[in-house]
Image (cartoon, rainbow, N blue to C red):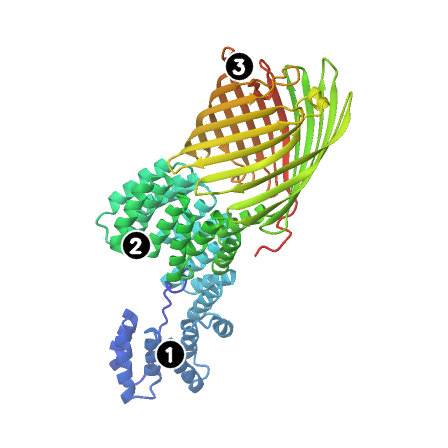
Amino acid sequence: MKLINKAVLFILLTVSTIATAQDMDKGFSNLEKGEFGKAEVFFKNILKDYPENKTARLCYARAIGLNNQADKALDNFIQLKKEYPGDLEIELNYAEALLWNKKFTEAKTFYSELVERNPTNFVAHLGYANTLSNLKEFKEALFYVNKALVLSPANPGALISRKYIKLGYANEKVNQKSYAEAEAFYDEILVDFPGDKETMLNKANLFLITKNIEKGKETYGVLAKTNPIMALNGLSLIEHIDGKDKKALEIAEEAVQKVVGNTDEALVKQTQERYVQALIWNKKYKVAQAKIEELNTQYKNENWLLALSATLAVYRSDFKESIGYYSTILENDSKSFDGNLGIANAYYADGETHKSLDAVTKTLEIFKNQNDAVNFLKKINEEYTPTLEEKLSYAFDNGKNTAKATLTSIVIPVSTKLAFNASYQYRETENTVTKASAKTNDFLAGVNYKFHPKISYTFNAGVTSANSNTSSYNQALIHTFFKIKPMKLQDLEIGYKREIQNFNSDLIDKEIAANNYYLNYNLSTNFNFGWFTQYFYTTQTDDNTRNLLFTSFYYNFMSSPVLKGGLNYQYIAFKNQVPTDYFSPSKFNAVEVFIELLKDEKIAKVNSWFYNANLATGYQFIENNDKQWTYRVQAKLGYKFSDRLLANIYGIKSNIASVSVAGFTYTEMGLRLKWNLFDKPIFELK
């Protein structure tokens, strides 16, 4: 934050009583008007005739110092200080010259002595305040600038210095997440400088960080009285954060129209930038691309345009392309915030975790405690932190079957590529009519290895121990699969799963093991449509086989929260029909329409709710029988208590026959807890 270079530090020179005093009035005037080049020439000429004149030497040193020759000015003041020890006027200028040369630690030591020896000197107190501000010692800086204002009430230079000290102090409070204190400083500044643009923008940014939509709109509303276009740009971003991207685009379009003919190039660029961002938020990618190309003819791939191209590429899932744009930004400016954090996000999206970590670490080295970078690093840390999950459930159907279960799972990442996991499930089933009952204990342990940014492999193995009214046995359990991203916007899972049919007590008693060979494939698009397909081929130890196909075609109506709807189709066929044992039609077809609302727990903030609701209805066709109406309701409601703990309840109710027999209804409800065991990974992220 620019604090001191905008502050006015005006030092009155005490003119010595000499015969040539009147001859220097023009030079004094040059200094006061900021005509430092002219002042330098003037006093240099004076010194040709009067080389020992203290005032001329002091003014000359001051002129060259303010004319970008700070090191030479300091040398001159050091010499004067030697020749005139204890001269307050020279000492004040010497101290200021230390500031020009960014020797803030030396200046602090010298100013502290000055104010101690001169407790009523306004210039010394103001200089000391500015020095402390440069050292980011804002509390002390504020104390001394206030003392300066007591010595010279309402002094314009001191008020401006206090403004920038408070802006710096507020920025520090924002980084410390002491948001109320930061807001108080902004309000104090606005008492001294009503409607100050810089302060209003900082205050509005505070409300963007804290997601305080109403206060943000209020602040931009005040700013609109003096800076309407800038306010519109801010309001567009506010609407985006509030999840109202269409409104954000409408405001951005209004700002673009208003900025036509404006001579403030920085404002023009900012407005065009926000407009393109709003187009991207609304997935108007072709229009955004065309606008970027149009702007490139005028601004020749400036960094802000490269950042827009990189953002567009991320939204299109062209992560390699996005990395290329961010790399060019960093070649132009290695300390670019957009470049450093942008490439961190792009690497992460592309599966390059190590490179992403390097980039976000560099971002935080340059921008200490920057909120977005801190949150991004926290997200990566959470991904690789050991987790413990507990799920309790109770289910029943209209066949008088009940099931109670508890499932405990633990995942322990030991690197960004390797993680171990284990789970234990206890399940108890009973038929309340036949009194048949069974208990199963499932133990699984395994490993997940990511050997390519777009390919990971998981292997889990274990055993199930079953006990029923008439039998007791152990059977092996296996689940192994590959997860692959073959192309952008595509996800593929290919796997094998060996399990025991355990829907009810009768099935457990029959000891039927199923070997499932399966494939899951999801295709997303940049135009809101998506397609998910699942295929299972199952062989069973009772010499039966099954083919199962499920496919879903859907459309995303909203992205925050997610709202999508579509059409599902399911087909099942068994080689053998054994209806007395389990639901095994030679052909089964089901068609349904569905709608789903989702706020994912991964994006939920601390002390906020997450949820999921899925409603579906349609018809099922069993063998050659008449169609039957079906329904399915799934719901989840959860709360994130902290960065480490969340919980949710859930419920399922369905009458689709694909999991049991025709004419049945199934209900399940449960509670789930998820706890991050530690506040960071057990290995060093690097």
Q: Nearer the viewer, residue 19 or 303?
A: 303
In this rendering, is residue 249 above or below 359?
A: above
Please indicate, yes or no, whether residue 202 appears anywhere in the rendered image: no
From the top left corner, tell me how far across and down residue 455 is, in percent. 53, 45
Look at the numbered disc 3 and give the secondary structure of its residue.
loop
Q: Which residue is mark 3?
A: 623
Q: Residues within 10 Å of mark 1 (few under 14, many from 20)?
A: many
Instruction: Name the residue at 61% across, 20% down.
Output: 667
Q: Which residue is mark 1?
A: 73
The answer for how far apart the CA atoms under marks 1 and 2 are is: 34 Å
Q: Which mark is residue 380?
A: none
User: Disc 3 vs disc 1: which is toward the camera?
Assistant: 3
From the top left corner, tell me how far across and down residue 557 is, in percent. 41, 31
Look at the numbered disc 1 and give the secondary structure of its residue.
helix
Q: Are marks 1 and 2 in contact (CB under 8 Å)?
A: no
Amino acid type indicated by mark 3: Glu
The reply, left or right, for residue 631 in relation to residue 310 is right
From the top left corner, tell me how far across and down residue 385 is, in percent. 61, 47
Instruction: Name the residue at 27% across, 75% down.
Output: 37
Q: Are marks 3 and 1 in contact (CB under 8 Å)?
A: no
Amino acid type indicated by mark 1: Ala
User: Disc 3 vs disc 2: which is toward the camera?
Assistant: 3
Q: Residues within 10 Å of mark 2 (few under 14, many from 20)?
A: few
Amino acid type indicated by mark 2: Ala
Q: Residues within 10 Å of mark 3 (few under 14, many from 20)?
A: few
Q: Which residue is mark 2?
A: 266
From the top left corner, tell me how far across and down residue 175 is, in percent. 50, 53
User: Disc 1 vs disc 2: which is toward the camera?
Assistant: 2
